[in-house]
Image (cartoon, rainbow, N blue to C red):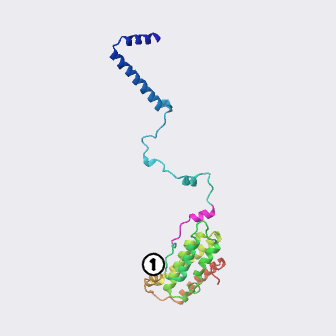
């Protein structure tokens, strides 16, 4: 190899001056290019160790969405299961919050009280708080005898009270309270449907509630005329259902009688 280098040097020595300059410049350029390549790729890996890129048939829509650190922590297997209070905070916010004034003072006061109890998610209401907030709903004449109020006002009070109960029953921590309130709600639904029959076979109490339940006056004024006056047996049966509801609510503290 040494002899070959000497032959190249002898050959270069015999070249004219202009040719020597051109060859030297070419060698210098080649050396500089090699240094640049080496500097840009100091840790170039072998072909079999090259980075593996995603397959070209994987589309962007198939890629997993990026997640913030907080969302990653929520699904981490190392995280403990949510506590009962956290689960309570995660429940769907009731439709009555923020409250809409119905122009029925008793109901509107109860709605505001319930919303105030839930305004601080870090401090969920106790069962006692919920009982005290709901109790005024059942201390009015409508829940002491069917004859105390007109049928139209009674139906509004019954429907609105029942929906407030449904919206808040899951906030009770006690399974006993939830079970007993569920029984009372079923009786209230039955009573609601029984009373609705006096407005005729074409009347739908469900549709009427969906349209007018947020306004006492609209609900009452848009009810159809009573199709037929109920007989005494009808009154007695409805009173019996009210008494059954109160018998469930009294041990829970929601009514005193």
Q: As rendered, which of 11 and 66 lies closer to the eye?
A: 11
Neighbour class for label 1 at 10 Å: few (<14), some, many (≥20)?
some
Please tell me which residue is depicted at 46% across the width and 47% down the height of the picture.
63
Residue 125 visible? The answer is: yes
Which residue range is magenta in the image? 83-95
Q: Is residue 54 above or below residue 34?
A: below
Q: Is residue 148 magenta?
A: no
Q: Element under label 1?
A: helix
Q: Residue furthest right?
A: 251
**Looking at the picture, how far across and down is residue 150, in whole percent?**
50, 88
Q: Is residue 8 above or below residue 64?
A: above
Q: As rendered, which of 155 and 21 lies closer to the eye?
A: 21
Q: Is residue 84 magenta?
A: yes
Residue 84 falls in which quadrant of the image? bottom right
- Tally the numbered discs: 1
The residue where tag 1 is placed is: 212
Looking at the figure, which quarter contains the C terminus? bottom right
**Looking at the picture, how far across and down is residue 138, in whole percent?**
59, 81
Residue 181 falls in which quadrant of the image? bottom right
Q: As rendered, which of 91 and 118 lies closer to the eye?
A: 118
Residue 186 visible? The answer is: no
**Looking at the picture, how far across and down is residue 132, in whole percent?**
62, 77
Please tell me which residue is depicted at 45% across the width and 27% down the height of the picture.
35
**Looking at the picture, how far across and down is residue 152, in whole percent?**
48, 85
Q: Is residue 167 above or below residue 56?
A: below
* In this rendering, position of residue 203 left or right of residue 69: left
Q: As rendered, which of 238 and 143 lies closer to the eye?
A: 143
């Amino acid at each position: 190899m040494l002899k070959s280098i000497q032959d190249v040097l002898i050959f270069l020595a015999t070249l004219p001056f202009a040719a020597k300059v051109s060859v030297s410049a070419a060698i210098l350029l080649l050396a500089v290019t090699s240094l640049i390549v080496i500097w840009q790729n100091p840790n170039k890996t072998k072909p079999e160790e090259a980075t593996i890129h995603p397959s070209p048939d994987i589309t962007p829509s198939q890629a997993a969405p990026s997640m913030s650190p907080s969302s990653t922590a929520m699904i981490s297997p190392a995280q403990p299961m949510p506590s009962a209070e956290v689960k309570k905070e995660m429940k769907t916010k009731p439709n009555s919050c923020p409250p809409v004034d119905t122009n029925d003072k008793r109901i509107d006061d109860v709605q505001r009280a319930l919303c105030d109890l839930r305004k601080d998610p870090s401090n969920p209401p106790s069962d006692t708080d919920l009982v005290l907030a709901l109790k005024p709903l059942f201390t009015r004449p409508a829940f002491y005898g069917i004859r105390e109020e007109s049928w139209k006002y009674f139906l509004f009070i019954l429907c609105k009270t029942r929906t407030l109960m449904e919206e808040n029953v899951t906030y009770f921590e006690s399974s006993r309270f939830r079970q007993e309130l569920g029984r009372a709600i079923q009786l209230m639904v039955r009573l609601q449907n029984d009373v609705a029959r006096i407005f005729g076979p074409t009347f739908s109490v469900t549709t009427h509630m969906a349209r007018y339940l947020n306004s006492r006056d609209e609900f009452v004024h848009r009810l159809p005329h009573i199709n037929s006056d109920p007989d005494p047996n009808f009154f007695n049966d409805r009173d019996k259902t009210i008494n059954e509801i109160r018998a469930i609510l009294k041990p829970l503290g929601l009514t005193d009688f």
